[in-house]
Amino acid sequence: DQQVKQNSPSLSVQEGRISILNCDYTNSMFDYFLWYKKYPAEGPTFLISISSIKDKNEDGRFTVFLNKSAKHLSLHIVPSQPGDSAVYFCAASANNQGGKLIFGQGTELSVKP
Amino acid sequence: EPEVTQTPSHQVTQMGQEVILRCVPISNHLYFYWYRQILGQKVEFLVSFYNNEISEKSEIFDDQFSVERPDGSNFTLKIRSTKLEDSAMYFCAGGKGQGTYEQYFGPGTRLTVT
């Protein structure tokens, strides 16, 4: 079951540059998308979300873009900082509040000083 | 800022034994979930719980699994007879609902079945 896919297992970026993490989905019923950050031995931490009625949502250094026609979303981190180094998961939910989240496999981001 | 807490942080058990994983969700959350992550794999949904009953469960959540919210604050996951393949990180999560979809996760319990 690969409804949510993150095709890049890892990404390395220089401090101060932009990090772009990508996510694709197949289920047209998904109407809400979330990004989580996870450190080893910790639970996922909610970062930012976007509803399917929008194409962009911004929160400080983090911006999520949604392209519904391509079933693609991306997370931009600008400027990247060493503390951003973690595994980033994209997750999706289908048109009911309280519904389960379907996660991608995650992308490990490494921000080098 | 309120947090989801989980105990124990690490549980080692022998195959066939029962385990209970405990969670204290954030007090104003109405929806509760268990997820698990087998080492190297994605986070997988197990079960959701709302209004004191299961609202959805995955194929993984078979008769060996059960959930309870016995006292309005704790939320537990019981595995009746553990198998080697139950070894994973188990995460409790909660959400407010009310038009929001965000779920907030606890730190997890690492379950090791030997």
Image (tube, coloured by chain):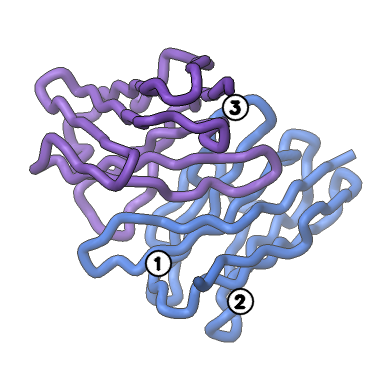
A57 left or right of B12? left
The residue shown at (44%, 70%) is B53
Query: Could you say which chain is coloured blue in the image?
Result: B
Q: Which mark is residue B74?
A: 2
Instruction: Identify the secondary structure beneath mark 2.
Output: loop
CA distance separating discs 1 and 3: 25 Å
Q: Quadrant of the C terminus of chain B?
A: top right
Residues at discs 1 and 3 both on one chain: yes
Q: Nearer the viewer, residue A56 or B9?
A: A56
Q: CA distance from mark 2 to mark 1?
A: 13 Å
Kind of residue sitting beneath label 3 = Gln
Mark closest to the chain's N terminus, 1 or 3: 1
Q: Which chain is purple?
A: A
> Is residue A35 toward the left or the right of residue B21 in the image?
left
Q: Which residue is mark 1?
A: B31
The image quarter in which residue A25 lies: top left
Q: Amino acid at mark 2?
A: Asn
Q: Chain of mark 3?
A: B
Q: Which badge, 2 or 3, comes first in the chain's sequence?
A: 3
Who is closer to the viewer here, A110 or B13? A110
Residue at image coords 61%, 76%: B74
Disc 2 chain ID: B
Residue shown at 88% from the left, 50% from the top: B13
